[in-house]
Amino acid sequence: MADAKVIPFDDDRSRQSAQRTGRRRPVPGRRKAEPGPQPLAGAAAPVSALPGAQEAVERPSGDRPADGQEQRGGWDRRIAGGLSFLRRRITGEYDVDEFGYDKELTDQVLMSILRPFYDKYFRVEVKGVENIPAEGGALVVANHSGTLPLDGLMMQVAVHDHHPAGRHLRLLAADLVFMLPVVNELARKAGHTLACSEDAQALLERGEVVGVMPEGFKGIGKPFGERYKLQRFGRGGFVSTALKAGTPIVPCSIVGAEEIYPMIGNAKTLARLLGFPYFPITPTFPWLGPAGLVPLPTKWTIQFGEPIPTDGYPPEAAEDPMLMFNLTDQVREQIQHTLYKLLVQRRSVFF
């Protein structure tokens, strides 16, 4: 495998660069029919006008469907929905955008796979998700940790399941993600794209919520002794992109991910041979083999901070290095301060 490189988010990258890292342009399927108009909320219809209402009034209580019949009807609907989903996947009657994002697959399959880890295993508590705007573009900037990038996936579930407007988070990822088989396709389907300014700005201008973790491999692969200490945020490329798009920056602090794989060592020689940025050594990996890949069941907290507006700056502000430095430092300090506050409030790593 070729040596993995971190895609610098500060650099403008062309579509050709994205294609070299494995982007496959999907062929859009036929669009699904739009749902018909729904009745206005609060508009009450006469009871007698509802289908079957008269029969329900006159039917004795003993003639009502049994609970078992209702359960069978629910299962019938689920089976019918599953078969309809499979038919659309086989026949190609579904939509993907130019980045490969498959909303139906993400909502019905990928989120369902991640949700048990989110709800039951890591027991994620979300705070301040309403700080993400209900509409329009926004750039969510978060700390990165945990040896494997599970924190980005849990943040994606948090926005998907808890935002009042039901928004979707589109994550920016390093090129290593798009070099791995299977992972490449799943990342594209889930809405992830290359961490380059061109892709990020295109998504923001379309009104998407975009997530970036500026620490990159420096954050996710740092030793356990440096946990919750933010690494360098680069040269402020994410700030420049937000300024160009005129979208707010939402700082995000994640507590709990640092302890899922306590990294006590790094086999650098082995990492170079495999083309990885690091090869972690933890208390369980590689000593326990595949079992060592199971993360520890820590208790997580994800807090979204107050948005930092960028629409008040002139167009040339994106080229002002001092302004970018100040805004980058402001975002970094806000995330670090919130991390310390959450750590003080935390009673236990696991409970």
Image: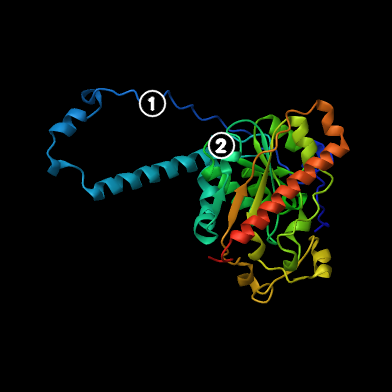
Report if residue 143 is visible in the image.
no
Residue closest to the eye, 323 or 61: 323
Q: Which mark is residue 68?
A: none
According to the picture, the residue beneath numbered tag 2 turns out to be 92
Residue closest to the eye, 50 or 28: 50
According to the picture, the residue beneath numbered tag 1 turns out to be 41
Residues packed near mark 2 inside 10 Å, few (<14), some (14 to 19) or many (20 plus):
some
Q: Where's residue 50, x and y in %? A: 25, 26
Residues packed near mark 1 inside 10 Å, few (<14), some (14 to 19) or many (20 plus):
few
- Name the kind of residue labelled 1 in the image: Ala
- Name the kind of residue labelled 2 in the image: Gly
Count every numbered label the image shows and give the total.
2
**Residue plotted at (62% across, 42% down):** 169
Q: Considering the image in quadrants, where does the N terminus appear?
A: bottom right
**Residue plotted at (63% across, 60% down):** 343
Q: Nearer the viewer, mark 2 or mark 1?
A: 1
Q: Where's residue 236, x and y in %? A: 81, 43
- Vertical placement of residue 32 versus 64, above or below: above
Q: Where's residue 326, x and y in %? A: 81, 41
Looking at the rendering, which quadrant does residue 172 occupy?
A: top right
Q: Secondary structure at mark 2?
A: loop
Residue closest to the eye, 147 or 303: 303
Q: Secondary structure at mark 1?
A: loop
Residue 73 lies left or right of residue 118; in this view the side is: left
**Residue plotted at (71% across, 43% down):** 193
Q: Where's residue 122, x and y in %? A: 55, 60
In the rendered structure, are the residues bearing label 2 and label 1 in contact, judged by CB atoms less than 8 Å apart? no
C-alpha distance separating marks 2 and 1 = 35 Å
